[in-house]
Image: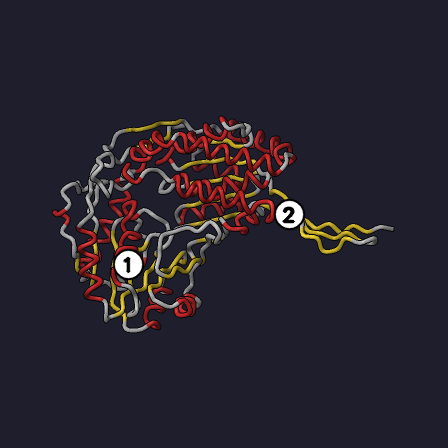
């Protein structure tokens, strides 16, 4: 068995190395989680909520270390801090709605019958977390799972090996029992074996379509619940009545923040012909203000991509598009830190169409294509011409117009005049190759619980 290495995008060095668990050790960890689940669920809800919130509070106390480690692990500039704003907001909201969401629903309570519905924890929840927003994506499932009375086994991506360790450290220090929340290092074969052996009652995976397909194959015939968020190719549509300045600022930030490494990042933009030239001009100017550099440099607003192989995919997409007639509007020489490796200059492409991979396949990098449209119908058709469906951003001045367009778009979330954001009160979900399942909102609790009916009769 080989060690799993974390290669830092900052300088190409081995930043961390961990040995994956043997199958026997992994099975033992799952058995401990199974044994700990019922005692954890038997604790009062208020106690579980308090312990989870205390764990998040302990995590906040590690902010300085976490921010530095994130820069080393996946390249995000330290000037942006960690992910604590979202972590805290999502934790607070899910804790706030827990009692109401998990409370029994009484149908009848009479001298003859008591009929009601409850929600019970599913048992052991397995979280397979990604590297791009490693704390936020974990919190989305970890918090409701623990609050609802499940135990959790967390496996983080190799690119962010230290994240799971920090989270376990924080939650254990706050009083969450070690067997209730375990961080593990597993290889793919062991992961698939555990899923196939019904070691878990629910698996939440965030990652690639290929990864999601592998999880489904491993779980085939086990009836294990799955939550799969498998990426996107999220569009923005700028109508003729849009606020141009706001649209440029939000959509370009949505496209390029975190080096474009966001599941719900903006990867393609459709602009009404009346605003197209002005939008493109302002988008290019906005992009040229970015500073690509070492994430520890306070001036850097764009760090390296998490791995050279990820940057290589984006470079290939850009090169293919240009060869097919696309026009690049950013000269990479304006970003001297671009080293042909993990450090990649941002790019804005025009003269693009849907025959190009850069407009159809997930890029997950600092590139965006912009197309001109003449009507809502044309924009809707283009937005739906995608194998993915996570979010869509519509820029208009009218709620009803945005809702009417949104009703015709095959996606999980419709934004009006914003993008690249998760509202904890709203369900995070997707369709098509983006996957299936729900997190956040009251439906996030439904994912990690199951309904149970009580039909009680007096005789």
Residue 60 locus on image (x, y percent) = 41, 33
Near-viewer residue (209 or 379) = 379
Point out the frontmost of discs 2 and 1: 1
Image quadrant where residue 398 sits = bottom left
Label 2 with label 1: CB-CB less than 8 Å: no
Please rate how many residues cluster around mark 1, counting C-alpha atoms within 10 Å: few if below 14, some from 14 to 19, many from 20. few
Residue denoted by label 2: 103
Near-viewer residue (81 or 196) = 81
Residue 342 locus on image (x, y percent) = 23, 40
Q: Residue furthest left?
A: 333
Image quadrant where residue 414 sits = bottom left
Near-viewer residue (65 or 6) = 65
Please rate how many residues cluster around mark 2, counting C-alpha atoms within 10 Å: few if below 14, some from 14 to 19, many from 20. few
Q: Dot 2: what SS?
A: loop
Is residue 376 among what the camera can see?
yes
Question: What residue is at 71 percent from the left and 52 percent from the top?
Answer: 116
Q: Is residue 337 left or right of residue 215?
A: left
Q: Earlier in the sequence, mark 2 or mark 1?
A: 2
Residue 415 locus on image (x, y percent) = 39, 59
Question: What residue is at 49 percent from the left and 26 percent from the top?
Answer: 173
If the image is split into quadrants, where does the N terminus sit?
top left
Is residue 199 among what the camera can see?
no
Residue denoted by label 1: 246
Q: CA distance from mark 2 to mark 1?
A: 42 Å
Q: Dot 1: what SS?
A: helix
Image quadrant where residue 395 sits = bottom left
Question: What residue is at 32 percent from the left and 71 percent from the top?
Answer: 378
Question: What residue is at 48 percent from the left and 54 percent from the top?
Answer: 426
Q: Is residue 110 left or right of residue 301?
A: right
Residue 418 locus on image (x, y percent) = 35, 57
């Amino acid at each position: 068995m080989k060690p799993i290495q974390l290669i830092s995008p900052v300088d190409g060095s081995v930043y961390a190395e961990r040995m994956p668990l043997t199958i026997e050790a992994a099975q033992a960890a799952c058995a401990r989680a199974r044994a700990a689940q019922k005692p954890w669920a038997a604790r009062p809800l208020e106690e579980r909520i308090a312990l989870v919130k205390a764990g998040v509070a302990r995590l906040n106390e590690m902010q300085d270390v976490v921010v530095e480690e994130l820069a080393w692990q996946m390249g995000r500039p330290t000037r942006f801090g960690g992910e604590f704003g979202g972590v805290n907001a999502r934790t607070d909201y899910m804790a706030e709605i827990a009692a109401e969401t998990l409370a029994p629903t009484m149908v009848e309570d009479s001298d003859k019958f008591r009929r009601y519905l409850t929600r019970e924890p599913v048992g052991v929840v397995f979280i397979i977390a990604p590297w791009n927003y490693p704390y936020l994506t974990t919190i989305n499932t970890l918090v409701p799972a623990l609050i609802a009375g499940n135990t959790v086994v967390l496996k983080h991506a190799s690119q962010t090996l230290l994240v799971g360790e920090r989270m376990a450290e924080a939650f254990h220090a706050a009083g969450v029992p070690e067997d209730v929340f375990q961080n593990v290092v597993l290889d793919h074969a062991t992961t698939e074996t555990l899923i196939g052996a019904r070691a878990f009652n629910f698996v939440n995976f965030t990652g690639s379509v290929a990864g999601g397909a592998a999880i489904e194959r491993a779980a085939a015939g086990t009836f294990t619940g799955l939550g799969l968020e498998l990426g996107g190719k999220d569009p923005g549509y700028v109508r003729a009545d849009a606020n141009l300045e706001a649209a440029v600022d939000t959509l370009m930030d949505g496209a390029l923040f975190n080096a474009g490494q966001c599941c719900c990042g903006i990867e393609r933009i459709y602009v009404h012909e009346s605003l197209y030239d002005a939008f493109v001009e302002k988008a290019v100017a906005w992009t040229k203000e970015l500073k690509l550099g070492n994430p520890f440099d306070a001036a850097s607003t764009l760090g390296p991509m998490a791995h050279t192989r990820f940057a290589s995919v984006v470079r290939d997409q850009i090169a293919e598009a240009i060869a097919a007639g696309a026009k690049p509007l950013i000269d990479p020489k304006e970003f001297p830190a671009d080293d042909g490796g993990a450090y990649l200059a941002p790019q804005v492409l025009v003269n693009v169409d849907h025959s190009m991979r850069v407009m159809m396949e997930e890029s997950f990098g600092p590139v965006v294509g912009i197309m001109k449209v003449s009507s809502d119908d044309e924009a809707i058709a283009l937005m739906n011409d995608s194998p993915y469906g996570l979010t869509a951003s519509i820029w208009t001045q009218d709620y009803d117009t945005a809702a009417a367009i949104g009703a015709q778009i095959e996606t999980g979330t419709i934004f009006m005049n914003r993008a690249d954001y998760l509202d904890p009160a709203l369900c995070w979900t997707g369709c098509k190759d983006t996957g299936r399942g729900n997190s956040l909102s009251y439906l996030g609790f439904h994912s990690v619980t199951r309904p149970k009916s009580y039909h009680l009769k007096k005789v």
